[in-house]
Image: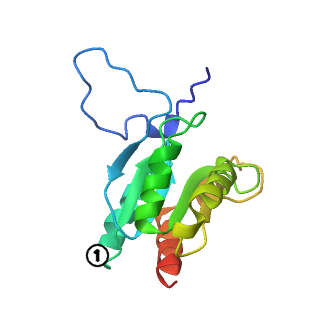
Amino acid sequence: MLYLEPKYLYRRIKDEIPADDYVVPIGKGVVRKQGKDVTVATYGNMLYVALESAQQLERDGISLEVIDLRSLLPFDEDMVMTSVKKTGRLILLHEDTLTGGLGGEIAARVADQAFLYLEAPIKRVTAPDTPVPFAPPLEEFFLPKSSDVNRVARELMAF
């Protein structure tokens, strides 16, 4: 098993830590925010980008359902399909590049199993297909932001 710990989240996330031992089940995601208009499936750092976007779009009357995949292989396919069937729209948000990223696999599965429920194309909000830059300002430009999610969500609502 491979576990990646994003250092970006160090000291940024303030959450309750259970007093007892606990286990995060592999292959089981969590709906972090209920919504009715657009599903955003994500994980890791991008979860907080999605939640920020959901808060911003709520003011404009767009309701995002934010799914935290938590594990990628396996990922909670049933949860993704259930949410997409409810909202009819899907944004796949991740830090990886567009080409070869996990979003392509999830998009293929949704197109295969829930195509008739889609009211708009499946969209991916990802990093560009370039090497990760070293300089902090370039890295900031490289990573997806809530403004990117907001723009794509508004595009999907036009369908």
Q: How many marks?
A: 1
- The local crowd at label 1, few if under 14, some if 14 to 19, many if 20 or more residues have their Cα within 10 Å, is few
> Is residue 143 visible to us here?
no
Q: Nearer the viewer, residue 5 or 54?
A: 54
Placement of 41 over or under 85, stated as above or below: above
> Is residue 106 visible to us here?
yes
Seen at 53% across and 73% down, the residue is 152
The kind of secondary structure element at disc 1 is loop
Quadrant where the N terminus sits is: top right
Seen at 45% across and 47% down, the residue is 79
Looking at the image, residue 74 sits to the left or right of residue 79; the answer is right
Looking at the image, residue 94 sits to the left or right of residue 146; the answer is right
Q: Residue furthest bottom?
A: 158
Q: Nearer the viewer, residue 143 or 41?
A: 41
Placement of 132 over or under 23, stated as above or below: below
Looking at the image, residue 14 sits to the left or right of residue 143; the answer is left
Q: Nearer the viewer, residue 28 or 44?
A: 28
Q: Which residue is mark 1?
A: 59
Q: Quadrant of residue 120?
A: bottom right
Placement of 70 over or under 80, stated as above or below: above
Residue type of the residue flagged with mark 1: Arg
Q: Quadrant of residue 130?
A: bottom right
Q: How is the image coloured?
A: rainbow
Residue 10 placed where, x, y %?
43, 34
Residue 111 placed where, x, y %?
64, 61
Seen at 29% across and 38% down, the residue is 14
Residue 66 placed where, x, y %?
40, 55
